[in-house]
Amino acid sequence: EQEVGSSLYLNPFCTLFADEDVPADMVAEESGPGAQNSPYQLRRKSLPKRTVCPTKTNMEGASTSTTENFGHRPKRPRVSAKCQDLPAAPAEQYLQEKLPDEVVLKIFSYLLEQDLCRAACVCKRFSELANDPILWKRLYMEVFEYTRPMMHPEAGKFYQINPEEYEQPNPWKESFQQLYKGAHVKPGFAEHFYSNPARYKGRDNMFYYDTIEDALGGGQEPHFDGLIFVHSGIYTDEWIYIESPITMIGAAPGKVAEKVIIENTRDSTFVFMEGSEDDYTVHMHWTSILFLSLRMFNPDDKSAQHHNAHHCLEITVNCSPIIDHCIIRSTCTVGSAVCVSGQGACPTIKHCNISDCENVGLYITDHAQGIYEDNEISNNALAGIWVKNHGNPIIRRNHIHHGRDVGVFTFDHGMGYFESCNIHRNRIAGFEVKAYANPTVVRCEIHHGQTGGIYVHEKGRGQFIENKIYANNFAGVWITSNSDPTIRGNAIFNGNQGGVYIFGDGRGLIEGNDIYGNALAGIQIRTNSCPIVRHNKIHDGQHGGIYVHEKGQGVIEENEVYSNTLAGVWVTTGSTPVLRRNRIHSGKQVGVYFYDNGHGVLEDNDIYNHMYSGVQIRTGSNPKIRRNKIWGGQNGGILVYNSGATWTSLGFIEDNEIFDNAMAGVWIKTDSNPTLRRNKIHDGSSTTALADCSWHRVSTACPSTAAYQRLPLLSPLPDNKIMNNQDAIEKAVSRGQCLYKISSYTSYPMHDFYRCHTCNTTDRNAICVNCIKKCHQGHDVEFIRHDRFFCDCGAGTLSNPCTLAGEPTHDTDTLYDSAPPIESNTLQHN
């Protein structure tokens, strides 16, 4: 505690320079040696001796003279309030009490940091004034140039703070203390600094150099602690090979990256060699203002060495530097911007901008690892990130976009953990996996790719979990050529083509995804591909749900497929999938559609509430349909028919429950010959459960009203239960509906056939009775006959729109295919 009238106050901030002793003349009494040499002579003149209270017997022997041992101040006796001190000398009193603060601050503004600390030890008033933040900000910016204090509380940790929000009263001084022993690279200043020792007295622990190479070579100085500040300037063609632990920091006011630039035209700009563990290249700002620009240009020479790889930043075996808030550019076409290679290479690269490079942005190979977080990687000529040959990085929260090639490319056993990255608007796929690569991609957004989202090929693998994949020009996910990835828990939506496209012997596990709103099929399986598709929701597609064609296979189980514009599931052209325990419902056309030799197994599914029939089998298809529940179809439960003269539709239909369908529960016609066993067909809207069995069409002049000849049913119907079916035609007529609503273009129910002469209908047109009453009211109409046809008015084929049927529905036979994927060009350039 401070004594009454004492002239000495020990301020806690005087410990700024912990390795230096406080000068002896600061703590000695006035008569001690060296008092006459003190720079503060006024402070030390004629200090009067204190008078002790005579009544305190335990203090009688206390010394009131100067210290006998120089440099050790004796403990002063505590005096009572009744004791009276002699007045201080006038000059001392004036300096300590009378001189205005503004004058003292002006005097202090000419002092350097160590002198300010000495002044703070004089008295309480001087301590407060010498710790004024404005004084320390001026000194701080003179040395470090930062416009906000950068704190360095521990090794490898740097962050900037707002002085107004900092809990301590003087963050400038605190930061000065933490950064004090660094070396400074400041071109042209070193000569001035060392030629003016009096001006910079007390800064013996600071070192100034003209080049980075010189600063790295000065690492043997006794007070050097590995901290290097690189000040404003362009540092060209320096050989920066780092083999020992250092910390390198850009130092400049304002936007540091525009003022601190390190570039090279001869070799890699930065090379971290073995032994540089725990290096730091660190920014001074916790916002997105960058502090160092690293540039690599094409070598000027045309020699054979031009073909060697030149990287802007190269990290080799057993190196683990931290690269933070750098701008990294490379116009070299024969090397990446950042290359991390070799066993034990494990850097931390964060908050960096790796953009506008003429090759790969970030290249991780040969068992290298590392943590790469919050980087901006964009507009690179080849892959934004390239991982190969057992590279296994952790890549989080990176923004990878507008690449001129693929966004992320992993191949040749490349691995890695990619989390919460935003990958978009790359020219090829957002993420490409090839040749036994096996990355893990979690909670990323992969979107607006100019081709597709994820492309897995040539035996690629990988786990893609809980990502958002959307708005890509081609398929959201491609899988081909014996690749076997896991696609789980993703949202795949609003693609300009399909959701998941598996072709060319592709496999994979497609599980638990939400696939919706895509322009083509939610999942497409073709050309001998055999994935496992389960627990997905496939809905609200602009086309169909699942499309299996060209000998596609696979197990499709426990999915929910609903509200798609066309068929819920297509199976065609020699395909043989197994569909089991799916819920396929609420489609705007057919539930499951087998055609053109579509085969496979359809078992234990719930198929219901479709605008057309629940299941259609046609043109040579021969599926096995068993143990399904098929109900709520607007055009029957199961429709088996043939649209070509050379086809025969077959199929095994057994142990199904078919109920509550409009029209027939099972409708078999036109040279079709399925086998039905042990089905329960009930509560339908048709008067017969097997309406018009095995009808053979006889050509007439009017195709819509062609005559049908009933032929014997070719297959037996043992043990089928048919009950409680009603006539849907009579119900539709009584309700005033257009009969096209319950027949569509595929069925020809028996009802009254009219023609309208006012609308110039021909022999190829037919109109139902309700459309004659409503749509053609007052026209010249003619009853033709009672026959089988669909209503052309409701189908939208007449000049006047139907007011009963709504918009016309298009054919479900439309074949389509997703656009072929485009492979990355990266391999061709590296």
Image: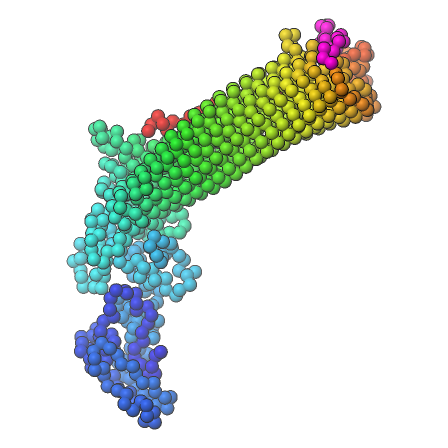
Residue situated furthest bottom in the rendering = 55
On the picture, is 279 further left or further right than 630? left
**Nearer to the camera, 505 or 329:** 505
On the picture, is 669 further left or further right than 234? right
On the picture, is 515 further left or further right than 187? right
Q: Residue at x 26, y 38 (%)?
A: 268
**Nearer to the camera, 420 or 780:** 420
**Nearer to the camera, 265 or 222:** 222
On the picture, is 442 further left or further right than 216? right
Residue 818 lies, in percent from the top left, at 52, 23
Q: Residue at x 33, y 49 (%)?
A: 282
Residue 697 lies, in percent from the top left, at 72, 8
Is 706 part of what is drawn in magenta?
yes
Residue situated furthest front in the rendering = 719
Q: Residue at x 26, y 79 (%)?
A: 73
> What quarter of the picture does the C terminus occupy?
top left
Residue 403 lies, in percent from the top left, at 41, 33
Residue 197 lies, in percent from the top left, at 18, 61
**Nearer to the camera, 275 or 334:** 275
Where on the picture, by quarter, is residue 738? top right
Is residue 718 visible to us here? yes
Is residue 539 visible to us here? no
Q: Is residue 605 above or below residue 393?
A: above
Q: Which residues are magenta?
A: 694-716
Where on the picture, by quarter, is residue 571? top right
Q: Residue at x 36, y 88 (%)?
A: 80
Where on the picture, by quarter, is residue 25? bottom left
